[in-house]
Amino acid sequence: NAGVTQTPKFQVLKTGQSMTLQCAQDMNHNSMYWYRQDPGMGLRLIYYSASEGTTDKGEVPNGYNVSRLNKREFSLRLESAAPSQTSVYFCASRKTSGGAGDTQYFGPGTRLTVL
Amino acid sequence: AQTVTQSQPEMSVQEAETVTLSCTYDTSESNYYLFWYKQPPSRQMILVIRQEAYKQQNATENRFSVNFQKAAKSFSLKISDSQLGDTAMYFCAFMNSGTYKYIFGTGTRLKVLA
């Protein structure tokens, strides 16, 4: 049981390049989330998916797109990377029902640098 | 809109001593959840403790306990018998039961001194 996995762990892009961050969970959770973490600002929600087939914008969605490929996978795409998107990106999942269904479990994060 | 405020950017404590991290939040909702997450240098976000707003009893997990004051909208974390491994960033988080979105505070960096 790996929990929440993210690939890659590190990435350097040039301005204007595109890339997709991958996230997968093996806990059979319904909801999945993408956050970015910047110094002094805590975690901010980019997008989330309450269940398979649905996605919704969070606090900072501009410049990003997401795909809930199936129940296990939730990807985040940067179509044209900008230096302002330099950050650490976290994926998380949540069960949504039953005991502790409110609790999110996080992946190890991806450190992205845009030059 | 909900907000979460952690007013202590950095704190330090001697090993084996007790330290309290503060967190306040603002919401008009009555049904919600509160969390403390720990982020060590490894960057992994680890759940420390959670509290349901409808429960009056304060949550405890081994050396970690909270002081939940619903009327004051305060949710502080007490770490007893601090250990070197407690050195980390600590984030307070709020989840609205209706939207299921989390709001995080800006974090408190805790250093445990030998």
Image: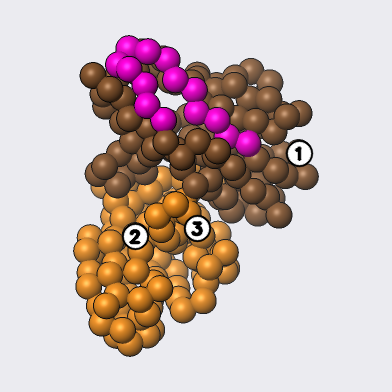
Chain colours: A orange, B brown
Label 2–label 3 contact, CB within 8 A: no
Q: Nearer the viewer, residue B10 or A114?
A: B10
Mark 2 residue type:
Val
Give coordinates of residue B70: x percent, y percent. Answer: 71, 29
Q: Is residue A93 above or below residue A65?
A: above
Give coordinates of residue B85: x percent, y percent. Answer: 26, 27
Give coordinates of residue B104: x percent, y percent. Answer: 53, 47
Give coordinates of residue A108: x percent, y percent. Answer: 29, 51
Residues marked 3 and 1, same chain:
no
Residues marked 2 and 3, same chain:
yes
Question: Is residue A11 magenta-colored?
Answer: no
Mark 3 residue type:
Arg
Instruction: Identify the secondary structure beneath mark 3.
Output: strand
Instruction: Identify the secondary structure beneath mark 2.
Output: strand
- Look at the image and tell me in which quarter the C terminus of chain A lies: bottom left
Read off the magenta span: B11-24
Q: CA distance from mark 2 to mark 3?
A: 11 Å
Which numbered tag is attached to residue B30? Answer: 1
Q: Residue at x 65, y 40 (%)?
A: B25
Q: Is residue A17 left or right of residue A39?
A: left
- Which comes before the other along the chain, label 2 or label 3? 3
Q: Is residue A107 above or below residue B84?
A: below
Kindly identify which residue carries mark 3.
A44
Kindly identify which residue carries mark 2.
A88
- Report crowding for label 2: few under 14, some 14 to 19, many 20 or more residues within 10 A (C-alpha): many
Residue B12 in view (yes/no): yes
Specify the quadrant of the image occupied by residue B66.
top right
Which chain letter goes with mark 2? A
Q: Residue at x 37, y 80 (%)?
A: A82
- Report crowding for label 3: few under 14, some 14 to 19, many 20 or more residues within 10 A (C-alpha): many
Which chain letter goes with mark 3? A
